Image: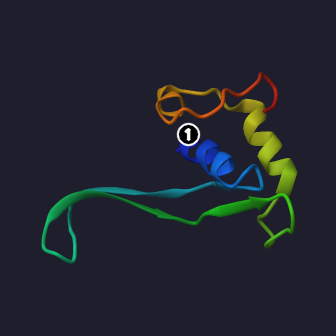
Amino acid sequence: MYAFQHWTHVKTEEQMMIADLQGVFIPDYINPDGQVKPLFKLTDPVVHNTNDRKGRTDRGEQGISDFFGTHVCNAVCRHLKLPACLPGGR
């Protein structure tokens, strides 16, 4: 999930980040076409927005900075060709 958070920040041109996702993995989900496929069902997103706070859980720039202060890029970040994080920040 951390690579996804990193990706959302890059794809929004550093304007926001989707964070704090929770959910479940359903290995044998039957989709509307009747096909059985694995599914990640994600809920409860928090959006940190640098321009305009969007609710009580939006921590804006501070939420984004806190994430990058502890995030260590992993194999998924590298596979997605995300820019490397600097220690203690972006």
Q: Residue at x 76, y 24 (%)?
A: 86
Query: How many marks are shown on the rendered structure?
Result: 1
- Disc 1 packing (10 Å; few <14; some 14–19; many ≥20): some
Q: Secondary structure at mark 1?
A: helix
Residue ID for mark 1: 3
Q: Position of residue 52 (x, y in %)?
A: 86, 68
User: Image quadrant of residue 20?
Assistant: bottom right
Residue 6 falls in image quadrant? top right
Residue at image point 56% right, 56% down: 21
User: Where is 39 relative to 88, above or below?
Assistant: below
Amino acid type of disc 1? Ala
The C terminus, quarter of image: top right
The location of residue 44, given as percent across then percent down, is 58, 66
Q: Position of residue 54 (x, y in %)?
A: 79, 72
In depth, the one of 83 and 44 nearer the eye is 83
Question: What colour scheme has been applied to the protein in the rendered image?
Answer: rainbow
Q: Is 80 situated left or right of 29 in this image?
A: right
Q: Is residue 35 left or right of residue 47?
A: left
Is 8 drawn above or below residue 74 in the view shown?
Answer: below
Vertical comparison of 43 with 15: above or below = below
Horizontal arrangement in the rendering, residue 68 relative to residue 51 (left or right): left
Query: Residue 57, percent across and down?
Result: 77, 65
